[in-house]
Amino acid sequence: MKFEYSRHWVKKQRFRTNITTADIEYTIMNSAELRDKYWPDALNAVCRIPPSGRILKVVYKRKKEAFKIY
């Protein structure tokens, strides 16, 4: 999977070092596509990440060749 990142996520990624690209990919692959409450064209993915058991929510949009992470 190819990912594009928003400026917001790039800034927040410095403080969220334990969330890796593999975690984001796992969440998108193992979750149903849920509509976002505020953005009609965005999708949500919510999944529990093994082995830590952390619940991760990813807000993304599908592009032709990549996923844009918000």
Image: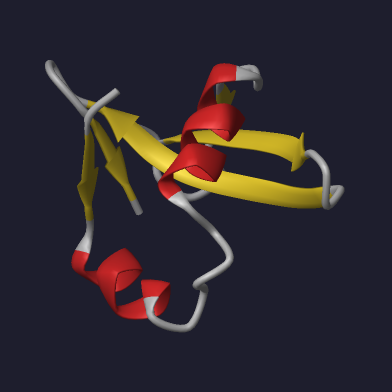
Classify residue 25 as left or right of residue 50.
left
Residue 38 x %, y % = 48, 50
In the foreground, 44 or 37: 44
Classify residue 51 as left or right of residue 12.
right
Determine if residue 57 is in view.
Answer: yes
Classify residue 24 as left or right of residue 69.
right
Quadrant assignment for the N terminus: top left
Rendering quarter of residue 10: bottom left
Work out which residue is located at the far left of the displayed protein and give it: 64
Work out which residue is located at the far bottom of the displayed protein and give it: 15
Residue 16 x %, y % = 52, 74
Q: Residue at x 13, y 19 (%)?
A: 65
Check the image and report above or below for 26 versus 32. Answer: below
Rendering quarter of residue 44: top right
Classify residue 23 as left or right of residue 66.
right
Work out which residue is located at the far front of the displayed protein and give it: 51
Total marks shown come to 0
In the foreground, 41 or 32: 32
Rendering quarter of residue 2: top left
